[in-house]
Amino acid sequence: MGRGQLSLDILFAMLLVMLTITNIVYLSTSEVAHAETLDSLAKVKTFSITVRDHAAKVYAVGEGFRKKVTLPFTIASGDSVTVTFNSTGNRIVINASIGGKGYSIVQNSTVPLMDSSVTLDDSKRDFWMVANVTGGELYVKIEP
């Protein structure tokens, strides 16, 4: 075996090592991106459950009761979370735009809701839930 053969073997081994390292880096960055997406989705889902539970509590206390709800996680400038109460299907819809990705969670409400909506961002992080009587019926609605 000559010196040229040995150099070629070393170059081939280095190429294999570099390909392996490149593949590991690609996989790790891909997994980090998936973990960040799952983290954001879990935060939005948890917030939607909290909103649903607070709506039931406000309804249970009765007319005139107000509860302040604050977004439990921080969002960057340009990101937003929209909370919508839909009276037609008694649904709470949370639409979030976080880090350029969109998330939508729908929760069925056990209490009557009034059509209302609020958008939260990095400067406005809270809203009020209010129990109101309209037409002899008690409803829960959102106020900024």
Image (cartoon, rainbow, N blue to C red):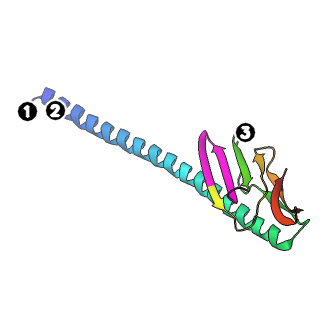
Image coordinates for residue 82, horizontal then vertical, percent: 72, 47
Numbered range of the magenta stretch: 88-105
Kind of residue at badge 1 = Met
Q: Hey, what amino acid is under mark 3?
A: Ser
From the viewer's perspective, tell me whether residue 32 is left or right of residue 120.
left
Q: Give the residue drawn at x 84%, y 66%.
A: 138
In which quadrant of the rendered view does residue 16 lie? Answer: top left
Q: Which residue is mark 2?
A: 6
* Residue 78 in which image quadrant: top right
Q: In percent of the image, x 62 and y 58: which residue is there?
A: 45
Quarter of the rendering occupied by the N terminus: top left
Q: CA distance from mark 1 to mark 2?
A: 7 Å
Report the mark closest to the observer, 2 or 3.
Answer: 3
Of all residues, the one furthest to the bottom in this rendering is: 60
Instruction: Judge by depth and name the residue closer to the eye, 60 or 136.
Output: 136
Contact flag, marks 1 and 2 (Cβ < 8 Å): yes
Q: Residue furthest top?
A: 4
Residue 91 rendering spot, x and y as whole percentages: 68, 58
Q: Which residue is mark 1?
A: 1
Q: Earlier in the sequence, mark 3 or mark 1?
A: 1
Q: Position of residue 123 (x, y in %)?
A: 80, 43
Q: Which mark is residue 77?
A: 3
